[in-house]
C-alpha cells in the first residue's frame, strides 16, 4: 500500500471536481434541498401536532446523517465510475495502483465531501430552522462514523456490480442508498415500517445509527450499546462489500470484461 | 541478446466455447523490439491484455522483469508502459495534469520534469495545457505514448499505436519510439495492422492465428518461409488460410 499513490488518486479526483461544477451539486445543492424539504415538512407536522416526534430537528437530523452515508458512498462509487465514463479504466489497470489504494483514495476524498456536505446542512439548518448542530455535540461523531463506513461498503459493492454487470449496474449505486435510507429508518423509527421489512431493518448497522441519532436529539444519552453494535455491523458491512467486489473483480479479469470499458 | 524482460509461457484463454488463446509463449528480451501480428480474432488483444494483467489466463505463467503476475502485478507495472491508439486520457484533466497523475502512480521522483521531458521527446509541448477531452485522435495517441514512456519502463507495450494518425505524424511517432528504445534500452512489444510499419520498427515478429503462434522470427525469414517477400503478403495468406 503506497500513501503516495493514494494521494495521487485524491489529486486526480480533485482535478475533476475543479472542472466539473455539476459535481458540486452532490455536495452543496442536494444537502441544501434536503434540509429545506425535510425541515419544512417537520415544521408543518409540528404545526399540526405540537407533540409530534416528526418535528424539524428529527427530520433535519435524519437528512444530515443520511448525507454522511450518501456522500461517502458516492465518493467511492463515482470515483471508480469516473474511470469508466472517461474510458480510462484500462490506463489505470496498467499502472502500479492497486485496488486497495484506489478505493482508499476515493474513501478519503469521501471524508472531505462528508465534511463539506455537513457544513452546508448545518449552516442551512441553523439559518432556516434554528437547528443548532453544535448543540448536539460530539455524540454525532460515532453515529456519523457508522454511516460513513456503511457508505464506503455500499460504494465498494456498487463498484463490484459495475465491474461484473457493466455500466447498466450503476443504477444499483444510485438506488441502493435510497433503499438503505428507507430500510434504516433515516426519518422514522423502524417500528413504522411494514412488518415484513422490519427484520431486514433490524440487522442493518445504519438502523442503529439513525436510532441513536433520534435518542440523542431527544436529549437522551448516547446509547452505547447501539453504537457498538452499529460499529461492528458497519465493519462487517464494509468487509462484505469488499468481499463481493473482490470476487467481481476476479470474475471481471477472468471473463475479460475490460473490453467493455475500452 | 539480453535476458527476457517479458516471459510468458503456455498462455491459454477460453471464453465460453471459444478458445481465444491456445498455448502461446511470448518472450521479449531486454532492448528487443517485437511485433505481435495476426488477423482479427487471432488472439492478439487477449494475449496483450493477459500480459498486462487485465485478463487472467486460464493457464500459463507471466513474468515481467522478474515480477510474476498476478501476485506482483503492481511491481510489474512499474516496469511496463502501455498505450493504445483507441484509449483516451482522462476527461477534464489538462494534458500535463493527466500525465502528472500517471507519473505519480508510476512512482516518478520528479513528475513535472518527467512530464516536460517526455512531451519534448515527442515534440508536443504545445499540448501541455490543453484539456485531454479537446485533443484530436492523433494528439490523443501521442499523449498516450508519452504517458507510456514517463517512467522510462523496461518494456513498452503498444496496441495499434499509429492506427489513427496521419502518415507524417505516424512517421514522427515511429521515429520517436525507435529513438526512445535506442536511448533507454527499453524493449518494445507492438501490435499493428500496418505491416510496413512493423517491418520498420521491429527485429522479430510473432504471427498469431486462431490463438496459436504460427510464425516467430525476423520479418524477412517469416516472409520467405511463407514464400513471400513482405509481411503484408504473409498476413494476407495467413488470414485467407485461417478463414477457410
Image (spheres, coloured by chain):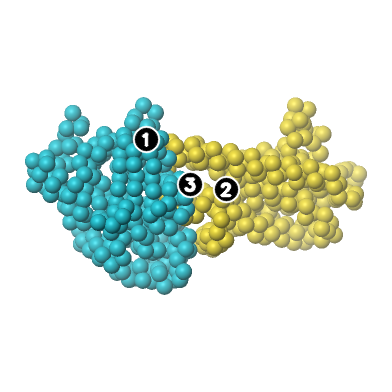
Chain colours: A yellow, B cyan
Whole-percent x, y for residue A137 in the image: 83, 59
Q: Is residue B132 left or right of residue A22?
A: left
Label 3's element? loop
Residue pictured at 53% horizontal, 49% vertical: A99
Q: Is residue A158 left or right of residue B234?
A: right
Between residue B186 and residue A9, name the one nearer to us: B186
Q: Residue at x 45, y 40 (%)?
A: A253
Q: Are marks 2 and 1 in contact (CB under 8 Å)?
A: no
Q: Nearer the viewer, residue A101 or B214?
A: B214
Q: Can you give x and y, in whole percent of width and height, for residue B46 in the image?
A: 35, 41
Task: Please tell me in which quadrant of the rendered image residue B8 appears.
Answer: top left
Q: Vertically, is B58 above or below A42? A: above
Q: Which residue is mark 3?
A: B71
Could you tell me if residue B136 is visible in this image? no
Between circles 3 and 2, the one closer to the viewer is 3
- Quadrant into which the C terminus of chain B falls: top left
Residue that numbered label 2 is attached to:
A77
Q: Residues within 10 Å of mark 1 (few under 14, many from 20)?
A: many
Is A113 or B56 nearer to us in this picture? B56
Q: Quadrant of the N terminus of chain B?
A: bottom left
From mark 1 to mark 3, how far is it between C-alphas?
19 Å
Q: Residue at x 73, y 48 (%)?
A: A146
Q: Is residue B228 left or right of residue A80?
A: left
Label 3 and label 2: CA atoms lie apart by: 25 Å
Q: Nearer the viewer, residue A192 or B202?
A: B202
Q: Which residue is mark 1?
A: B13
- Helix, strand or loop at mark 1: strand
Q: If you read the primary sequence from the N terminus, does the residue marked by circle 1 or circle 3 appear first?
A: 1
Amino acid at each position: 500500500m503506497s500513501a503516495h499513490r493514494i494521494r495521487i488518486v485524491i489529486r486526480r479526483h480533485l482535478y475533476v471536481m475543479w472542472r466539473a461544477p455539476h459535481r458540486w451539486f452532490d455536495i452543496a445543492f442536494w444537502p441544501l434541498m434536503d434540509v429545506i424539504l425535510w425541515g419544512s415538512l417537520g415544521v408543518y407536522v409540528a404545526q399540526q401536532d405540537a407533540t409530534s416526534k416528526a418535528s424539524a430537528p428529527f427530520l433535519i437530523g435524519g437528512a444530515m446523517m443520511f448525507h454522511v452515508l450518501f456522500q461517502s458512498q458516492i465518493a467511492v462509487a463515482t470515483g471508480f465510475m469516473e474511470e469508466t465514463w472517461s474510458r480510462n479504466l484500462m490506463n489505470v489497470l496498467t499502472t502500479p495502483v492497486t485496488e486497495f489504494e484506489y478505493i482508499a483514495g476515493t474513501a478519503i476524498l469521501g471524508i472531505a465531501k462528508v465534511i463539506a456536505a455537513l457544513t452546508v446542512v448545518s449552516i442551512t439548518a441553523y439559518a432556516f430552522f434554528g437547528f443548532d448542530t453544535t448543540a448536539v455535540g460530539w455524540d454525532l461523531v460515532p453515529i456519523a462514523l457508522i454511516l460513513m463506513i456503511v457508505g464506503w461498503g455500499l460504494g465498494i459493492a456498487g463498484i463490484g456490480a459495475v465491474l461484473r454487470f457493466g455500466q447498466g449496474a450503476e443504477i444499483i449505486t444510485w438506488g441502493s442508498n435510497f433503499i438503505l435510507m428507507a430500510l434504516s429508518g433515516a426519518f422514522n423509527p423502524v417500528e413504522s415500517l411494514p412488518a415484513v421489512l422490519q427484520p431486514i431493518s433490524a440487522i442493518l448497522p445504519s438502523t442503529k445509527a439513525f436510532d441513536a441519532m433520534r435518542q440523542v436529539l431527544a436529549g437522551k444519552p448516547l446509547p452505547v450499546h447501539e453504537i457498538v453494535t452499529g460499529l461492528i455491523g458497519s465493519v462487517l458491512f464494509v468487509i462484505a462489500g469488499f468481499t463481493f467486489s473482490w470476487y467481481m473483480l476476479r470474475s471481471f479479469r477472468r471473463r475479460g470484461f475490460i473490453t467493455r470499458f475500452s | 541478446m539480453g535476458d527476457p524482460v517479458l516471459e510468458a509461457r503456455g498462455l491459454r484463454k477460453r471464453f465460453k466455447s471459444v478458445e481465444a488463446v491456445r498455448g502461446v509463449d511470448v518472450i521479449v528480451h531486454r532492448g528487443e523490439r517485437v511485433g505481435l501480428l495476426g488477423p482479427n480474432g487471432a488472439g492478439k488483444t487477449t494475449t496483450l491484455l493477459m500480459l498486462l494483467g487485465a485478463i487472467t489466463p486460464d493457464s500459463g505463467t507471466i513474468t515481467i522483469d522478474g515480477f510474476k503476475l498476478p501476485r506482483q502485478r503492481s511491481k510489474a507495472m512499474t516496469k511496463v508502459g502501455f498505450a493504445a491508439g483507441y484509449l483516451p486520457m482522462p476527461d477534464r484533466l489538462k494534458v500535463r495534469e493527466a500525465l502528472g497523475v500517471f507519473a505519480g502512480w508510476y512512482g516518478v521522483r520528479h513528475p513535472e520534469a518527467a512530464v516536460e521531458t517526455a512531451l519534448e521527446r515527442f515534440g508536443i509541448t504545445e499540448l501541455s495545457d490543453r484539456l485531454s477531452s479537446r485533443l484530436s485522435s492523433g494528439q490523443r495517441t501521442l499523449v498516450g505514448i508519452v504517458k507510456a514512456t514517463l517512467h522510462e519502463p523496461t518494456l513498452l507495450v503498444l496496441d495499434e499505436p499509429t492506427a489513427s494518425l496521419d502518415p507524417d505524424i505516424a512517421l514522427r511517432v515511429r521515429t520517436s519510439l525507435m529513438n526512445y528504445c535506442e536511448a533507454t534500452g527499453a524493449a518494445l512489444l507492438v501490435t499493428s495492422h500496418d505491416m510496413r510499419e512493423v517491418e520498420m520498427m521491429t527485429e522479430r515478429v510473432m504471427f498469431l492465428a486462431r490463438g496459436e503462434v504460427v510464425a516467430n522470427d525476423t520479418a524477412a525469414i517469416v516472409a520467405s518461409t511463407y514464400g513471400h517477400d513482405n509481411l503484408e503478403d504473409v498476413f494476407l495468406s495467413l488470414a485467407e488460410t485461417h478463414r477457410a
